[in-house]
Image (tube, helix red, strand yellow):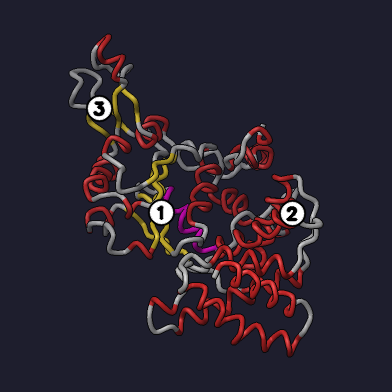
Amino acid sequence: MSDDMLRAPVEVKFAEELDWLESVDDRPKPFSWRLSPRMIRIFILGSEPADGLDREISQKWFGDRSFVERSIVTLASDRGLLLIGDPGTGKSWLAELLSAAICRNSTLVVQGTAGTTEDHIKYSWNVSMVIAKGQSRESMIPSPIMTAMEKGVIGRFEELTRSTSDVQDALISILSEKYVSIPELDDDNIVFAQPGFSIIATANSRDRGVNDLSSALKRRFNFVRIPVVTNKKSEAEIVRFRTEELLRRHHIELDVPPTLLDILLQSFADLRSAAASATSDDDKLESALSTAEQIGVLEDAILHSNFFGDRTLRAQTLASSLVGSLARRSPEDLAILNKYLHGVVEPRSKKHGGEWPEFLEGGREAIATLS
């Protein structure tokens, strides 16, 4: 079934694994959860020999165990969970994994934007049905959050701080009172949340000041801050995991040489270091230089090599993809990347050789093309 979807949700993609975990899970479960807290942690972080399972469970999220455990504990309480961190730190992926493991439904999602309204988190109306039969529960269109309330499952709210204060305030009564009133109806005009309902929200720390959360709403959430991955080993595991997923999805048979993965990781580490020491925004790349963007660079290089190259990933193609993906402002970003190539990559290529000279050449050619 997952082969028929461009991007299958977690509960579809890992259905067999979830089924197996559920069949052997004899631990207590909160509410109507499909898995116990310990099994949810194993599903997300992967199994270890000490878990005593008869099969290996793959690791799907790469981060500190304490973040996952605190998230699970929060959802077992009556508080919402707010995952906050820089772009590309895996907040949405963790939210999807948690929802899939708890209730086998990660698709009840509201995307927060400046255009998100209160209707998007409560309900709206089927206009044609209202005209024909009047307002009733049948002519009401529940939001994903209201559907989650009725079913006693997890609702997700992406980019909470991008929505306006009116929308955020509407969440306060949902999180505290656990019901939604429908004043347009005389009867059956309250939707009560069923046991197991909760909300996982995400927010980018870079959006601070856009639409800050009120203190009242903050009290309804437990905050779990997801840091940027700085450990090279952990970041390499994330990139490798996502790359293997990409190759399977596109049915591509192409090796990613470990030396090129090292070059990609080192390049992002160098650029992050330069951004940290920059004295003004003009001296920083517009890119967040997140792990997600690193995966995007590698994905671009792999697809280019497969469709327009000789199905071999080369340093020159990787450098071209890096420049093309990170140079969002011209001439500012191009100047920063050019400075990096001349000041860091060129000396390194002379000292270490290997595939660095080809990476340097590919970067220079890409900058010349874009300039």
Q: Going by the image, does 191 lie left or right of 38?
A: left
Which residue is depicted at the point 56% across and 79% down?
Answer: 338
Going from N to C along the chain, the mark reached first, 1 or 3, is 3
Image x and y of residue 334, in percent: 52, 73
The magenta segment is: 65-75
Q: Nearer the viewer, mark 1 or mark 3?
A: 1
Of helix, strand and loop, which one carries label 1? strand
> Which sits in the foreground, 39 or 186?
186
Q: x, y (%) of residue 124? A: 29, 28
| Residue 172 visible to an observer of this rendering | yes
- Residue nearest the viewer, comparing 327 with 116: 327
Q: Is residue 222 left or right of residue 26?
A: left
**Are the residues at dot 3 and dot 2 in contact (C-beta closer than 8 Å)?**
no
Q: Position of residue 241 (x, y in %)?
A: 67, 57
For mark 3, what is the residue? 190
Residue at 59% in and 72% down:
367
Identify the amino acid type marked 2. Phe
Q: Residue at x 76, y 45 (%)?
A: 251
Q: Is residue 63 above or below residue 47?
A: below
Residue lying furthest top? 132
Residue behind mark 1: 202
Badge nearest the viewer, 1 or 2: 2
Identity, as a three-letter code, of the amino acid under mark 3 = Ile
* Disc 1 and disc 3 in contact, CB within 8 angstroms: no
C-alpha span from label 3 to label 2: 58 Å
Q: Residues within 10 Å of mark 2 (few under 14, many from 20)?
A: few
Position of the N terminus, as image quadrant, is: top right
